[in-house]
């Protein structure tokens, strides 16, 4: 069995990786951590403008043998691969139970202008969302629903927070994500691109079921989701073309952000794929 080349958590290379757990160092280096086989596999196959996203990979001997395909893909992408001891992986990882693979990746966010130029038909806008787990989960839901982009407004959580990266379960590498966009600029730009702005709010004056029944959800749509604690402020709701609530047919008081986002995004995805929806027209 091969011997790990990195055995000391105090080595310079390990220290450089470990500091990426902090936002200020991520921003300075424009690098972030991707942990676990799913995230690393996606990172190894991802490029931005022809430049590989995965820069470096730390792997235990056991993980390197178990995930030989990922190690090969990482090397094919030009990443430096290091066999590391369990102690090193535990030191670099931000999880309680590391899975033996930790990658260092280049930032991959997309300029908002590029998102608009692609004429998206389904977008998730996170307005001042602060919880990294929620942000990553909404990104995963948007990916699963077939959205073309996610926008994180200014004052939202860092896209590259390790918890957000983990919660996206690889979806971070699947679709464009714009960051740091002021809410008003995001709404204005999307409207100019022909996208209807729908704010998701439990106190909305329109019901999602009624919107679907009335056939208003089939066109290009951007859903705006608010902060976990206080939702969307009045000034943000006022920017939207419609403020829609998810109906609660049972006794639950409310839905959490990620669950509500999944319901809304899939409602749009289904409407857009129905007869007369924007996807069935453009894809036929």
Image (tube, rainbow, N blue to C red):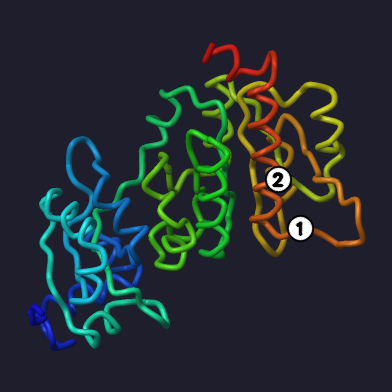
Q: Position of residue 18 (x, y in %)?
A: 25, 77
Q: CA distance from mark 1 to mark 2?
A: 10 Å
Q: Which mark is residue 191?
A: none
Q: In the drawing, what numbered circle is on residue 263?
A: 2
* Residue under pointer 1: 255
SS at badge 1? loop
Residue at (59, 49) in percent of width and height: 127
**In screen coordinates, is 204 left or right of 78?**
right
Q: Quadrant of residue 235?
A: top right
**Quarter assignment of residue 213:** top right
Dot 2: few (<14), some (14–19), or many (≥20) neighbours within 10 Å? some
Q: Nearer the viewer, residue 102 or 177?
A: 102
Q: Does 229 sit left or right of 43 as displayed?
A: right
> How far across and down, in percent of the image, does residue 241 sit?
72, 29
Give the number of marks: 2
Horizontal side of residue 148 vs 276, given as left or right:
left
Q: 124 or 82, which lies in front?
A: 82
Residue at the spot 29% in from the left edge and 62% down from the top edge: 32
* Callout 1–callout 2 Cβ contact below 8 Å: yes
In screen coordinates, is 238 left or right of 192? right
Depth check: give the residue in front, 7 or 2: 2
Q: Secondary structure at mark 2?
A: helix
């Amino acid at each position: 069995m091969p011997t790990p080349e990195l055995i000391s958590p105090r080595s310079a290379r390990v220290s450089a990786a470990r500091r990426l757990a902090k936002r200020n160092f991520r921003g300075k280096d424009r690098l972030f951590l991707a942990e676990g086989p799913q995230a690393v596999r996606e990172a190894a196959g991802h490029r931005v403008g022809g430049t590989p996203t995965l820069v470096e990979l730390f792997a235990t001997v056991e993980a390197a043998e178990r995930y030989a395909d990922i190690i090969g893909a990482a090397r094919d992408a030009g990443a430096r691969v290091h066999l590391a001891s369990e102690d090193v992986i535990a030191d670099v990882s931000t999880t309680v139970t590391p899975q033996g693979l930790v990658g260092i990746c280049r930032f991959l966010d997309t300029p908002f202008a590029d998102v608009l130029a692609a004429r998206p038909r389904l977008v998730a806008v996170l307005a001042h969302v602060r919880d990294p787990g929620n942000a990553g989960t909404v990104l995963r839901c948007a990916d699963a629903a077939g959205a073309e982009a996610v926008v994180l407004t200014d004052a939202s959580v860092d896209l590259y927070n390790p918890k957000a990266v983990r919660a996206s379960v690889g979806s971070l590498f699947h679709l464009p994500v714009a960051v740091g966009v002021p809410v008003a600029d995001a709404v204005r730009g999307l409207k100019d691109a022909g996208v209807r702005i729908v704010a998701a709010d439990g106190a909305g004056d329109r019901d999602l079921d009624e919107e679907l029944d009335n056939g208003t959800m089939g066109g290009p749509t951007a859903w705006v989701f608010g902060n976990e604690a206080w939702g969307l402020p009045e000034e943000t709701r006022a920017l939207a073309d419609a403020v829609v609530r998810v109906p609660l047919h049972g006794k639950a008081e409310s839905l959490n952000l990620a669950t509500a986002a999944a319901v809304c995004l899939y409602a749009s995805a289904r409407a857009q794929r129905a007869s007369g929806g924007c996807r069935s027209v453009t894809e036929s």
